[in-house]
Image (cartoon, helix red, strand yellow):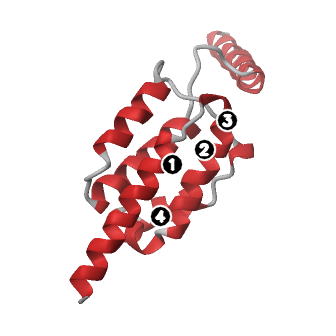
Amino acid sequence: MLLVQRKELVSIMNEEIVRLYSNFDKDNLSVFFEKLIGFINKHDDMFREFIFENTLEVVKTFKAKDFFLGTSDENLEGSIHLYAGRLKNASNKDICENVIHLLWDIAAYMTKEICLSCQDRLSKDLILYQSNNYLQDL
């Protein structure tokens, strides 16, 4: 009986993640991001089996508004549709790992440009470094 319930849960997770990924819209990345967090919260017990607890607890606190969402993947839309196809019959472990990886990828977006805050900090560090080296040369 328990095995049958477990298989039904796997099937439900597969259907949900495939539906979520199939409805991906690159122009609504924050909505997609929040839906991924909701998916994790909904299937918390399953994620706890495969994802480190510390990682899971941090990810569950993510809010789209706290990040500059994006990805270094030039074809995110194509990748997500590819993931949707692969996750149709995937194991719970594969689903959990894919969702966590995708969240990190979107939240840890890197650009080739330095943001103004980081640029300001780097400038201050450079001035301090140059001052210290100058004083050492005296």
Callout 1 crowding tier (Cα within 10 Å): few <14, some 14–19, many ≥20: some
In depth, the one of 132 and 29 nearer the eye is: 29
**Quadrant of the frame with the C terminus:** top right
Q: CA distance from mark 3 to mark 1?
A: 13 Å
72 up-or-down from 100: above or below:
above
Q: First in sequence: mark 3 or mark 4? A: 3
- The picture quadrant where one finds residue 47 is bottom left
The residue to which callout 3 is attached is 28
What amino acid type should be assigned to the residue bearing mark 2? Answer: Phe
Residue 54 is tagged as: 4
Disc 3 or 1, which lies upstream in sequence? 1
Give whichever of 18, 32 is nearer the camera: 18
Helix, strand or loop under label 3: helix
Label 1 is placed on what type of residue?
Answer: Leu
Q: Is residue 45 visible?
A: yes
Query: Could you give the CA–CA distance between mark 2 and mark 4, rounded to whole angstroms?
Result: 23 Å
